[in-house]
Amino acid sequence: MKSYPITLKLRSQKIVIVGGGVIAERKLRKLLETGAIITLISPEITDLISTFVSEGKLTWKNKNFSKDDLTNAFIIIAATNSREVNQQVYEACNQTQLINVVDNPALSNFFVPSTFRRGKLEISVSTSGASPGLSKKIVEQLYTQFDDSYEWYLDFLADARSIIQERITEPKTRYRIQRNLLEPIFYELTRSQSVEERRELLEELLTNDGEFSRKP
Ligand SMILES: C[C@@]1(CC(=O)O)C2=NC(=C\c3[nH]c(c(CCC(=O)O)c3CC(=O)O)Cc3[nH]c(c(CC(=O)O)c3CCC(=O)O)/C=C3\N/C(=C\2)[C@@H](CCC(=O)O)[C@]3(C)CC(=O)O)/[C@H]1CCC(=O)O
Ligand SMILES: NC(=O)c1ccc[n+]([C@@H]2O[C@H](COP(=O)([O-])OP(=O)(O)OC[C@H]3O[C@@H](n4cnc5c(N)ncnc54)[C@H](O)[C@@H]3O)[C@@H](O)[C@H]2O)c1
């Protein structure tokens, strides 16, 4: 069976992390950016987790895991250093909950990919559990390739897309403009910060039935 990659919006969703070590901390750092309501269960926590707790970013329950900790959780991360406890977490969850058991891919119904963001661009890599280290390495390579300019480029593409949706009603023309918008010239003009020239070229597509008057 193949997995199904999705990106989740987690604002106000309940998340429970069991364990407070370095792996829990790594998963937590990313989750804190999502606006989720996070509870962490562990008798011990790292210094950084402790700082987050004192800043009010999550709730810490200073105790060992028990079954009732999972009530109403949408996502559960079992990240203790005990295989038995992680297995107990798995057994306590129900089939509608998303669970990631950090030392047992067979018990997890989702994995966390290696990710980086450039503004609206998000690149995620997974090896389906085969080699998380390789995922990280590939992401490091892509991070260099997709530099800061992609943040500006995506901002431009998003703005242009709303303009197109507002001004063009004919589906075929819309599609043609969207396709021509991805010609390298728009990226090059973004990179060189030639904003006025880029605006004129977009206007040309909008007023010329989605075509360039001459091939850029
Ligand atoms: C991508 C990343 C996301 C994140 O965790 O945030 C992530 N692992 C990362 C790093 C990493 N993990 C490990 C090493 C040491 C080298 C090595 O062992 O290979 C390194 C490298 C490092 O730390 O540098 C060890 C490890 N990982 C798992 C096991 C258990 C097992 O396989 O049985 C063990 C053995 C533990 C042990 O033996 O004790 C399991 C999983 N790790 C996954 C994700 C999922 C598969 C994703 C995929 O296939 O791509 C999966 C299945 C479940 C999950 O955790 O979601 C993150 C990179 C973050 C970044 O980009 O910076
Ligand atoms: N998935 C991954 O990416 C990945 C990567 C490396 C390691 N691992 C695995 O992750 C596991 C955790 O590693 P770590 O480095 O964070 O360990 P760690 O020793 O730093 O932390 C373990 C934490 O679990 C807590 N804990 C122990 N028993 C508990 C209980 N009954 N209830 C609640 N909390 C409890 C401890 O208080 C501690 O905070 C290891 O088993 C390792 O094999 C996973």
Image: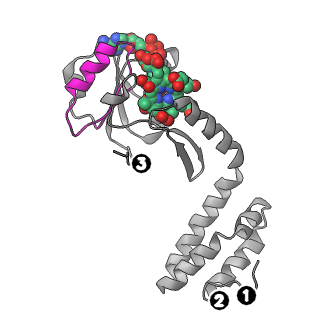
Mark 2 or 1 closer to N-term? 2
Mark 1: give few (<14), some (14-19) or many (20+) Cα within 10 Å.
Answer: few
Q: Over which residues does the magenta segment extend?
A: 74-101
Q: Can residue 113 be seen in this view?
A: yes
The residue to which callout 1 is attached is 213
- Disc sitting over residue 5 in the figure: 3
The residue to which callout 2 is attached is 208
Mark 2: give few (<14), some (14-19) or many (20+) Cα within 10 Å.
Answer: few
Mark 2 or 3 closer to N-term? 3
Residue 57 lies, in percent from the top left, at 43, 29
Left or right: residue 175 compared with residue 154:
left
* C-alpha gap between disc 2 and disc 1: 7 Å
Indicate the amino acid at tag 2.
Asn
Where the C terminus falls, by quadrant? bottom right
Q: Which of marks 2 and 3 is in front?
A: 3
Query: For the point 36% across and 24% down, which residue is it?
Result: 104
Is 143 drawn above or below residue 207 in the view shown?
above
Query: For the point 56% across and 36% down, which residue is it?
Result: 135
* C-alpha gap between disc 2 and disc 3: 38 Å
Indicate the amino acid at tag 3.
Pro
**Element on which disc 1 rests:** loop
* C-alpha gap between disc 1 and disc 3: 40 Å
Residue 77 lies, in percent from the top left, at 35, 28
Mark 3: give few (<14), some (14-19) or many (20+) Cα within 10 Å.
Answer: few
Left or right: residue 96 compared with residue 61:
left
